[in-house]
Image (cartoon, rainbow, N blue to C red):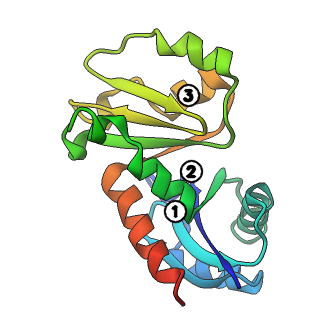
Amino acid sequence: MKNTFIAILRGINVSGHFMIRMHDLKTKLEVLGFQNITTYIQSGNIIFNYEITDQNELSGLIGNNILQNFGFNVPVIVRNVTEIKAVIENNPFVNDRKENIDRLHVTFFSRSPDPEMIRKISVLNFNPDEFIVNQDHAYVFCPNGYGNTKINNQFFENKLNVTATTRNWKTVNQLVVIANEHMFI
């Protein structure tokens, strides 16, 4: 049985840089044996089935494939469906505070950061923007919009020494909807 994964690419198809047509990417991943590949919007969200379960290995396979076929390095973060479901189920901005979901984001990390580094940034104040780090991701609330916040990928990368990429709440939820369909293919 194949496992269902979600790969989240950072920095493609933004402002005309690192352009990859999702159809072309899908074709290149099929050559590696990825199955039931579905992409969601052009920002690099890929849902697929594959027999390998090591997420770092999958990240490397996808990243190397992009480098070989498209000529540039792209950070790739892979999670399984269960992990993304847990991200959705445990969002404190939704569960505890009932914040406007249009202002919520999730920043995914390449690995869990050092707890001491998390402790150091947790005391920083970016009012009205807020974040809560939870292992290998952070929940981000930006009442004035994500484009106006200092709590962005670069912030987390610099402060936590991880690779980071962010998706809005709607996208995270839609990825799970699509992934659930893959589980029954």
At a point 46% along the width and 60% down the height, the residue shown is: 43
At a point 22% along the width and 46% down the height, the residue shown is: 102
Q: Tag 1: residue type?
A: Gly
- Which label belongs to residue 10? 2
At a point 20% along the width and 38% down the height, the residue shown is: 98
**Residue 30 image offset from top left, x and y in percent:** 69, 85
Q: Tag 2: residue type?
A: Arg
The residue to which callout 3 is attached is: 156
Instruction: Indicate left or right for 15 with 51 as reference.
Output: left
**SS of the residue under disc 3:** helix
Could you give the CA–CA distance between mark 2 and mark 3, rounded to whole angstroms? 14 Å
Q: Earlier in the sequence, mark 2 or mark 1?
A: 2
Could you give the CA–CA distance between mark 3 and mark 1, rounded to whole angstroms? 20 Å
Instruction: Indicate left or right for 61 with 24 as reference.
Output: right
Marks 2 and 1 in Cβ contact (< 8 Å): yes
Looking at the image, residue 174 lies above or below residue 38 = above
As rendered, which of 66 and 117 lies closer to the eye? Answer: 117
Marks 2 and 3 in Cβ contact (< 8 Å): no
**Residue 169 image offset from top left, x and y in percent:** 34, 50
Marks 3 and 1 in Cβ contact (< 8 Å): no
Instruction: Please identify, in this view, whether the residue under mark 3 or under mark 1 is nearer the observer.
Output: 3
Q: Quadrant of the N terminus?
A: bottom right
Q: Which image quarter: residue 95?
A: top left
**SS of the residue under disc 1:** loop
Q: Tag 3: residue type?
A: Phe
Instruction: Indicate left or right for 82 with 152 as reference.
Output: right
Could you give the CA–CA distance between mark 2 and mark 1, rounded to whole angstroms? 7 Å
At a point 56% along the width and 50% down the height, the residue shown is: 10
- Pointer 3 local density, CA inside 10 Å: few below 14, some 14–19, many at least 20: many
- Which label belongs to residue 44? 1
